[in-house]
Amino acid sequence: MKNLILSGICCLFILLGGQAASAAQGSNTGWTAKEMGERGDAKGASLQLPLLPPDKTYPANFHCSEKPTSCQFHLAYFLADGFDLSKKQRLNILFIPGGPGAIVDTGSRTAALQLLEKKHNVVYFHPRGMAGSPIDGSKEYDQFLRADYVVEDIERLRQAVLKGRSWDAIYAHSWGTVIAQRYAAKYGKSKVASLILSGPVDRHRTDTQDARSRMIVDNLKAIFNYYRSRGTANCQCASGAFLKSLVTDYGQPQITIMDTHLGPSDNFCFLKAEAADKIARQLEKILPQIDENYGSAEFIVDNYAQLKDDRGFQAAFGKFPIEFFAAVRYLEMAGAPEKDSLVFAADSRDRINAALVIAYYLTPESSSGCSLKSGLFGGTAGDCEYCERFKAAKEELLARLGGRESRRGAYVFGVYDGVARWISVMMGTKGCFSGKDLEKFANQTGAAKKFGRDQVRKIGIVENEKICPWNPGEYRHEVPTLLIKGSRDTVVAGCQAEDFMINGLKDGSRVLLEFRGLGHDVSVANLYEGSDPSNWSKVFASLLEDFITMSAKPAQFRSDANVKAKLEKLKVRDRTRDPNIAAQCGRNS
């Protein structure tokens, strides 16, 4: 996933009641250091913190008085360069990453964050159980990985780092919005003056899974249609000039990775309408099969080597290489171009990569190998280099695999905080379920859903714990909040950001901004290593700063002339008072 908004996702509290977490039966006995995530190169300090807040009781087998270290961990945190509490003009901002499982280091901060660091005191941390904040890898310690406990960690971090001051803002992305919402609900304006929630998730709505699948397919169609030249009967590839009117920064120094720029072969002119529709319909059919049997494309990518021995997987998906699932995964995050939206070169390259690979492997005639005479590219002009472009797309997708994400964080926080879709889909449940239900599913026998059961066995289970889809309405608060969503964000499809605003925030203290065409990473021309921030990144960062400084009066922020000019430059819709929200989203609890 691109740069940090780290994406770019998950929430619930634990009912200990003196009961120890039980490990589901299986060969998995605990989490390795690698599965907890690599620390990265960020330099910082740590706080020694208790595993449970004072008002919670440790399970009977945890003898904290005899061995205090068994009930403690060290929270790693990092202060941005220039951090200086003595300079009153510098705002104090905490960033909470997404995932769950995303890890902050020096190379994973967005352009906006890096720009904010230059003027303000930005604080980062590794959530408990991940990377630089490890907790014992035994599964019985998974019961200490819950959103409510991260909230307490943040409060202790505030006390230690800000010396009694409050946060001027908590800036959170995806799963991080779950933590920020709960923190604001518990501690209020006295501890945090404003929230910026990017890609806010809300999982209690019953239609979000279907909405996600529909948007993934729609995004693929939009990519096929947008990145194509018009009026060239034989699909000539001599020039990429057609992109000049389609890509916002095409004429600027392009912010790309691995020196991969857009060119003549970034053109879907070869794909006829009927062929594009057929590919989209095939993807629409495959997505539910992936979700119901293997959780997600993300899970398949993470476990692809092991799935080579899974007969069911091989029968259903054995013809697809790992880069196909990597392409599906990226398509879920990348967004899609819309009319009157910002379309950046780097996003375009990645979108085309994903769409090209998906199209190739869903075209049966391509199975014998890439050719300009048959299969997906059959009949294109002789000057086209589509086979080379397809090869580059695969290589660039494969280069994104791996990373420092915490698998433990993704699995445990994802399930127990109620944001992970895969567990409900594979168990066939809607609404709340218990740890006992989770264990019952894990201990089933037979070939059906075996992969899903194997994933559940990795997690420590508390039988009597209630697990519910994340609902921000249960943590409603009055802290002024800026919600940011991409209009083509599949992760929050199905009115999640809108529901978050209506049910989780007080009217008059909330603002919802929608970025046309952007996906879950809300890229706004993110920079890569060695690149300078783009003009759009600078405007975006200044917009966030404007909200923080004017958060006491959100109406003033919305009506400010300079803010409106920035929204216009970024092609952003202010949907705070959009009358269509109630009609389109309504109430779905």
Image (spheres, rainbow, N blue to C red):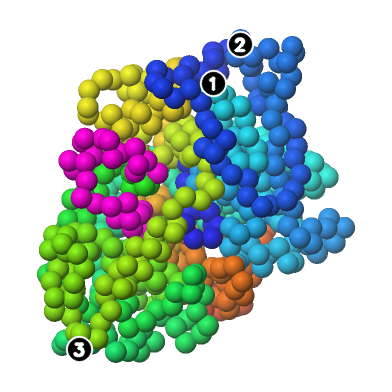
Q: Please, what secondary structure does the residue beneath circle 2 have?
A: loop
Residue 151: percent from left, percent from top: 63, 37
**Over which residues does the magenta segment extend?**
302-331
Answer whether residue 317 is magenta in the image.
yes
Q: Circles 1 and 2: CB distance less than 8 Å?
A: yes
Q: CA distance from mark 3 to mark 1?
A: 63 Å
Question: In whole angstroms, how far apart are the C-alphas of marks 1 and 2?
Answer: 10 Å
From the viewer's perspective, tell me whether residue 84 is left or right of residue 566: right
Q: Residue at x 75, y 13 (%)?
A: 65
Give the residue number, with chain letter if any, for mark 3: 232
Callout 3: helix, strand or loop?
loop
Q: Nearer the viewer, residue 33 or 94?
A: 33
The answer to whether residue 160 is magenta is no
In terms of depth relative to the viewer, which is nearer, 410 or 188?
A: 410
Q: Quadrant of the C terminus?
A: top left
Q: Position of residue 38 (x, y in %)?
A: 59, 44
Instruction: Tell me which corner region of the image, top left, top right, bottom left or bottom right, holds residue 387.
Output: bottom left
Residue displayed at 71% across by 34% down: 74
> Residue type at mark 1?
Glu
Residue neighbourhood size for the residue with mark 3, other residues' Cα within 10 Å, grouped as few (<14), some (14–19), many (≥20): few
What amino acid is found at the position of numbered circle 2 in the picture?
A: Asn
For label 2, the residue is 61
Q: Residues within 10 Å of mark 1 (few under 14, many from 20)?
A: some
